[in-house]
Image: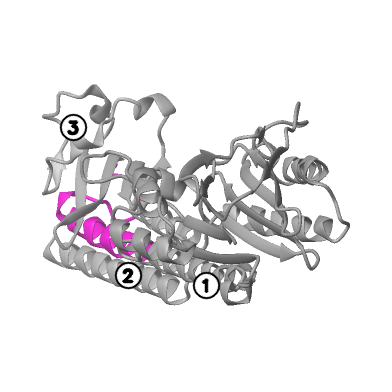
Amino acid sequence: MAKSSSIKRLKFCNFKLDALLEITNAINENLSVDKLLETYEHILLDELKIGKVLVFAKSDKWEIMLKSGLKKDDITGIDIEKDLSEHEEITGTSSSDNKFLSAFDFIIPVYHDINAIAYVLIGDVDEEKEGVSPTIKHLRFIQTLTNIIFVAVENKRLYEENLKQERIKKEMELASRMQSMLVPDTDLFPKNKDIFITSFYLPHFDVGGDYFDFEQLSDSQYFFCVADVSGKGISAALLMSNFQASLKAYLTTGIKLPELVRLLNIRVVDSAQGEKFITFFAGKYNSVTRELRYINAGHNPPLLYDKKIKKLTELKEGCPGIGMLDEIPFINEGIRILENSSKLICFTDGLAELENNNNEEIGLAELEKCMINNESVDKNFECLKKSLNLKKGNPALFDDITILGIDFL
């Protein structure tokens, strides 16, 4: 009898070594998660002759990683938090009040450091079947085996997640570099006897959905615009890049503003498929006639200030946002003759919706406070940046901020 017992112990020791070697080789060969689980299942079912196996494992959330010998209805009533999380040691199910646990014989919790990473439920333990039986004295081995497997599975998940994050980081860096090339250089904006243009741009993320631009169409004709894509991130930046390319192409044709808006709407509808839209303000200024034409397509109304009569006006004439509708039902073009020296400040809603600590919107109030004077727009910008702390790292900033300022001299 003693000899037979020793042979059994030796046989099981050899089995455990073989099983651990098989698992270790599978991990070292960097097999897929499916292959690792297939190896694990083979050891439990074919070698240990376990009739029922249910394994819950946790990565981001708890999920069933292995199920064998069970019907769907056998597991519907098992609640991990309620039925399993209290078990820190291997436990029989005979004392459980949950009838769904009665299909199993043992609950085997598996911890890594101090955190539960898996729960193994086994049933139909048959001592008479051929092979080494998983009696209670061998449950620790199943626990150890499960720990090795699911730590490896989690490590693979984290490694793949890190690779994914690294790819995303590189894509973001590339997108950021590409977008920075599309942001116009304020130093190249005209600063002459007729007009002075400056800007301020602060993306909330590495890439953003705000856009501003300027083009000198002739000696006396100037075009300028500000736009904002709904949403943030790469998709917003890609749509805006496409929008900018279309805008640049249309401007070379001497197009009028209403037709420009109509064609841009067609392009955005085709590109965004109804998932995003763009608010857009575009203006044309003739420095000889001092005529300002503009269209506000659902954008925050820019502020026009007449320095002589001290009057502040919002520029609202226009139409719905670009891409909101398949066809824009109306496009109204605003026209102003700037009889006196004036200044215009255009901005996106990152500024308009800026709040203080009491959740009160203060962006426009501060803009008006800094703007109602005879100072130039670049001086107004310095005032605004100081009063609102417009810089990276300010926790109150939750969106891209773009400001375009023009002095009509």
* Foreground residue among 227 and 292: 292
Residue 287: % across, % down: 72, 59
| Picture disc at residue 82 | 3
The answer for how far apart the CA atoms under marks 3 and 1 are is 45 Å
Front position among marks 2 and 3: 3
Per the image, label 2 sits on a secondary structure element best described as helix
Q: Which residues are magenta?
A: 125-153
Kindly identify the amino acid type of the residue bearing the numbered disc 2.
Answer: Leu
Residue 220: % across, % down: 77, 63
Please tell me which residue is depicted at 67% across the width and 49% down the height of the picture: 282
The answer for how far apart the CA atoms under marks 2 and 3 are is 32 Å
* Foreground residue among 132 and 328: 328
| Picture disc at residue 173 | 1
Q: How is the image coloured?
A: one colour
| Picture disc at residue 20 | 2
Q: Are marks 2 and 3 in contact (CB under 8 Å)?
A: no
